[in-house]
Amino acid sequence: MKRIFTYSVSVLFLLLFITPAFAQSVTVKGKVTDAADHSTLVGVSVNVKGTTNGTQTDVNGNYSISAPSNATLVFSYIGYTSQTIPVNGQTTINVALNTSANELQQVVVVGYGTQKKIDNTGAVAVVRGSDISKQASTNAVSALQGKVAGVEIINNGQPGSSPTINIRGLGTIFGNTQPLFIVDGVWYNDISFLNPSDIESVSVLKDASSTAIYGIKAANGVVLITTKRGKTGKPTINYNAYVGWQSVTNQVKMADGTEYATMINELYADNGIVPAFSTNPAAYGTGTNWYDQILRNAFVTNHQISLNGGSDKYTYNYSFGYLDQDGIVKTNNYMRYTGHASGDWKATKNLKFGYTISLLSSGSDDVDPGIFHQLYTAAPIVPVYYNTGKYGDPADYNIGGGANYNPEATIDFYHQHSKNHQFTGNIYGQYTIIKDLVFKTSVGGQLSQAEVRNYAPVYFATGGQNSNSSTLSLDHTEDRNWIWENTLTYDKMIGQHHITVLAGYGAQRNENDYATATGKDVPFAKSGNLHTSFPANSNIGVVYPHGLGSPNYVNTEDYALGRVNYSYADRYLLNASIRYDGASEFYPTPYGWFPSIGAGWVITNEDFMKNQHVFNTLKLRASYGRVGNAGLTTTPSVQIVTNDPTQYTAIFGNPQTIAPGASINTVVAPMTLWEDAQSTDFGIEGSILDDHLSFEAEYYNRLTKNAVFPLVIPGSVGEIGPLGGLLANQADIQNKGFEFQVSWKQQVNKDFYFSISPNLSINSNEVTKVLSGS
């Protein structure tokens, strides 16, 4: 390893000191149009090849850029074939771009940079922001459903909630199963704060070759999200909205009153018991359809307005969004306000600054989490209300305690309101030190505050649904996270050799504070006291939970990383990366190495393929890498102490005094390591039929070693913590399978474009070894 590192550093320094032949700069102007209908193209990227110097076309398709007289300009635009044109001292270059369905020529976002998909050796899937915003989806993750092979997304249907996303199966039992989300360079565990309409592109990194650059947070895959940024041109205002209804589909068919009474009688008869309903069961008729009583067609409306524009020096993008979504349970509602702002400022020829800010304010009227269980088990022979206006009581019908509730009473007396406020963003600075060598630094973070207020009143609805005292509770959570990253990138073309070298260092800190307060015998006020403080003279108790979700939970990380990308004649590809990563929760062994290597062969760029007319592009790739999963729900190296005064109290002296006590009731393993995922990947991808039909197939094998979960230990040890045992590394879990994706894309004319993209995933998940034998 040391020898490889020495060689890499030597090559980097050799390239840095190659003396280039400097040429006189000229200002190149021109216009970019569509080759088919000659319409102007707005926002086309115009870059000087091999540098970060670039611009975009304005609303009239015009551009202006300063470049060396012997430089080469690259014109690229989503959905069009890129063009590379030598300057050769010209001051005017007009370009006509042709539409393209070739996905492999698209530029994709990868870890700490961008790359043409055809030059990438990892398993990376890309979804454009325009494809996400076309769907009436309130969450960006939900909009990915069905679009990427190997990605499973499960929505729970509750307004404002985040879906579960699994990439290539589950590789952990106790650890985090969600992928790492990175939005404009800032790391998140959840992206519910993000308005789908603000997204420019999403890259899903699935194999270890593409994710190893993210170390101990990347075992479950990485989702890279780039939000929209400003484009050069006059200010442009866009408004987008939709209105609709959501309803339950494939609803469970339930027994009506007659059927239910008949089945209960048959059950009692089989057990030798006198039938519960001696009268004719048909007398109950259809009874109560509890699904129809509690559920509804839920109204949803979403609005977004954005402002975009800029000059050669400064570009900007601002947006504001409003979402109002009813839940299918009739008392459930979620409202969300989002704001997004980004700007890029070119201070000098070599210096550039930028920022991104996202704001969220949301609130919801919640429902009892057990309401669907009640709907499924509530007896249809029980009416919603009696003729007297009282609630129908299951206890009056001798049907046992399993269905001893009236769902209407449940939602009527359940008062809970949640709200969330969040600020996220980052700022960056980028400086071109010399030609081809760029330094970038960025600082980002997240500040959020969430509250859940619940009021349980004094009430009597049924025999099993009543309360003699009232309770007002408040759960308060705060998160304060920051990340600082620095990278140095060297990008050089030497003849047909293209090499990109990346080196970087970063650090981050995550802090979580949580507390809950409860007031007893609180009088009922407007909205059930959900929008007020605790009333005066309330009997209030404040608890700071220990263990899971403990207050002042702090985790810090620091890391160094490096990567080399090499290609020869866009034919032979090599990618190697390494990351030295550490996290404080794994003290005293916080650090580890995470290497990866990938190789690719673009077969269609070989001379022997020039005269064939079957494949437009064809590429083989293979990769191996190692990543980790440090996303445990608690800190494994911290011993938890409980000081509950109801359990641990001592009485001393005369007169007697009470002294609080404490107990160590968890056991910590001598050493706990992060979960280690090692994976290999083999893939083939290409396109045929003038790039209209693209395909991708791959095989992967991922082995997660040292999976963490509780190890059962004797009760005599004194372990009574929430984990139920000794937390330790003790299992190996294997995920392997195949993925297939086919896409047909065609531009019929300038007004009509369509695409079809089915995919198939086959995954085999197996626990291959358990050290404890249980």
Image (tube, rainbow, N blue to C red):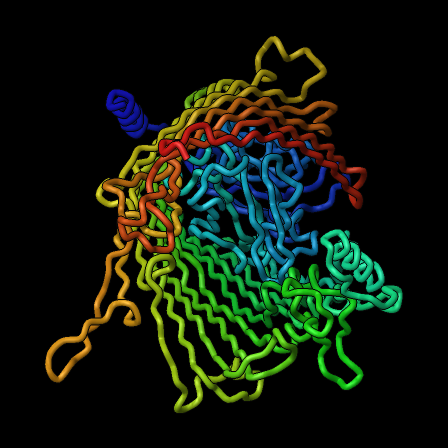
Residue sitting at 35 percent across and 32 percent down?
A: 594
Number of numbered discs visible in the structure rendering: 0
For residue 488, side relative to residue 106 (left or right): left
Residue 511 % position (x, y)? 34, 59
Quadrant in the picture for residue 427: bottom left
- Nearer to us in this view, 480 or 649: 649
In the current view of this chain or complex, which residue is farthest to the bottom?
A: 536
Residue 725 % position (x, y)? 35, 47
Which quadrant is home to the C terminus? top left
Q: Is residue 47 visible in this depiction of the protein?
A: yes
Above or below, 687 relative to 144: above
- Nearer to us in this view, 120 or 135: 135
For residue 339, side relative to residue 278 (left or right): left
For residue 25, side relative to residue 74 (left or right): left
Quadrant in the picture for residue 287: bottom right
Q: Is residue 565 visible in this depiction of the protein?
A: no
In the current view of this chain or complex, which residue is farthest to the top?
A: 608
Residue 660 % position (x, y)? 21, 72
Which quadrant is home to the N terminus? top left
Residue sitting at 52 percent across and 48 percent down?
A: 225
